Image (spheres, rainbow, N blue to C red):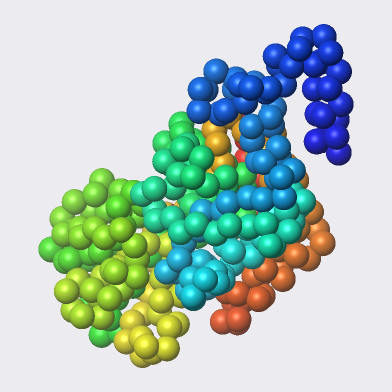
């Protein structure tokens, strides 16, 4: 609907203004001077080509996991729902692996159109990108060996704690738990390997990510998630900062997915396989896209 109206409006305006307000040759977002032109260079316009590039995680089981050329997990299913709602078939999706630290630059540089990658919405990131969602609320927690004495973030003093550069959990350890010895990698699977090898005492990130590692067959019986989340991590869908129209459209798609059962199905086909019931997608909490 929106795109039709936009096309008509732009068509009519083009007659009057010779296309000046409708993108035309100047529709590249990187100039940053056309923040108010809705959707002409955003994901809605891009989707009309039938193609979209999604930035996703590749090493987070249950959420975003790459096996060969296939990606799977809850974030991947959410991305497919967004693509479908924007009129892009699955065959038109290009998956691009992102790590925590390159999500904002990938969006800003146009290397990806949309990020669905366990991506916490916060004010600092909102300076650089826009967020639809949240579609899930996680919380920071700790993954430790089963026999560990670590019972929460307060017992991290002097302990080696692994997290990922550019992530909110790493930032929180630096600012609130200064006595912990923070070790940073670029992805959580490297932290989990270090935990398995005894090089670190704990891994910290969102509970839902840690649960995915704990459930992996090769770590069966080795790790536990402490289970006392100490932050709120609302997962958003990242896109260009000035793409208000795209953001609103994504929130509309999420509303529809909550109503028609496709959100629940995305959960049940992925993280829900562990028996955890599908969360409620609270559509009253969706961002205002500003
Ligand atoms: N949700 C947190 C963040 O966006 C941690 C998970 C991640 O690094 O992807 O930083």
Residue 139, image x and y in percent?
A: 45, 59
Q: Quadrant of the N terminus?
A: top right
Residue plotted at (37% across, 88% down): 218
Vertical order, 64 against 238 (above or below)? below
User: Does residue 185 appear in the picture of this structure?
Assistant: yes
The residue lying furthest to the left in this view is 158
Quadrant of res 179 = bottom left
Identify whether 288 is placed above or below 145: above
User: Is residue 144 or residue 128 the one in the foreground?
Assistant: 128
Residue at 63% of width from left, 50% of height from top? 52
Q: Residue 71 at x, y = what percent?
A: 54, 69
The front one of 245 and 23 is 23
Q: Up-down: is 9 above or below 285?
A: above
Quadrant of residue 269 in the image? Answer: bottom right
Residue at the image point whose x is 57% and y is 47% from the top:
114
Left or right: 49 with respect to 271? Answer: right
Of the pair 4 and 268, the residue shown nearer to us: 4
Locate residue 267 relative to residue 139 in the image: left or right: right
**Point 56% across, 82% down: residue:** 274
Q: Where is residue 233 in the image (x, y as percent from the top left)?
A: 48, 53
Q: Where is residue 250 in the image (x, y as percent from the top left)?
A: 69, 46
Image quarter where the C terminus lies is: top right
Camera sees residue 122? no
Horizontal side, residue 2 vs residue 98: left or right: right
In this image, 24 relative to 259: left or right? left
- Looking at the image, how many numbered discs can be counted on the residues? 0
């Amino acid at each position: 609907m929106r795109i039709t109206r936009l096309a008509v409006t732009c068509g009519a305006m083009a007659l009057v203004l010779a296309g000046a307000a409708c993108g035309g040759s100047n529709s590249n977002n990187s100039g940053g001077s056309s923040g108010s032109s809705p959707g002409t260079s955003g994901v809605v316009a891009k989707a009309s080509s039938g193609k979209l590039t999604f930035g996703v995680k590749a090493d987070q089981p249950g959420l975003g996991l790459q096996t060969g050329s296939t990606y799977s997990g809850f974030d991947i299913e959410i991305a497919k729902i967004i693509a479908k709602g924007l009129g892009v078939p699955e065959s038109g999706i290009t998956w691009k692996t992102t790590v925590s630290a390159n999500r904002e630059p990938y969006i800003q540089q146009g290397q990806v159109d949309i990020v669905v990658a366990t991506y916490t919405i916060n004010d600092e990131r909102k300076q650089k990108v826009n967020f639809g969602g949240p579609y899930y609320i996680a919380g920071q927690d700790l993954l430790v060996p089963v026999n560990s004495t670590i019972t929460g973030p307060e017992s991290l003093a002097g302990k080696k704690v692994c997290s990922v550069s550019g992530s909110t959990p790493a930032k929180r350890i630096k600012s609130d738990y200064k006595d912990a010895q923070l070790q940073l990698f670029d992805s959580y699977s490297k932290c989990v390997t270090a935990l398995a090898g005894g090089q670190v005492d704990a891994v910290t990130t969102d509970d839902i990510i840690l649960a995915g590692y704990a459930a992996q067959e090769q770590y069966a019986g080795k790790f536990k998630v402490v289970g006392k989340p100490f932050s709120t991590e609302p997962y958003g869908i990242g896109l260009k900062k000035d793409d208000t129209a795209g953001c609103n459209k994504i929130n509309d798609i999420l509303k529809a997915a909550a109503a028609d059962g496709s959100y629940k199905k995305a959960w049940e086909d992925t993280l829900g396989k562990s028996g955890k019931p599908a969360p409620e997608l609270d559509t009253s909490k969706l961002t205002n896209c500003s």
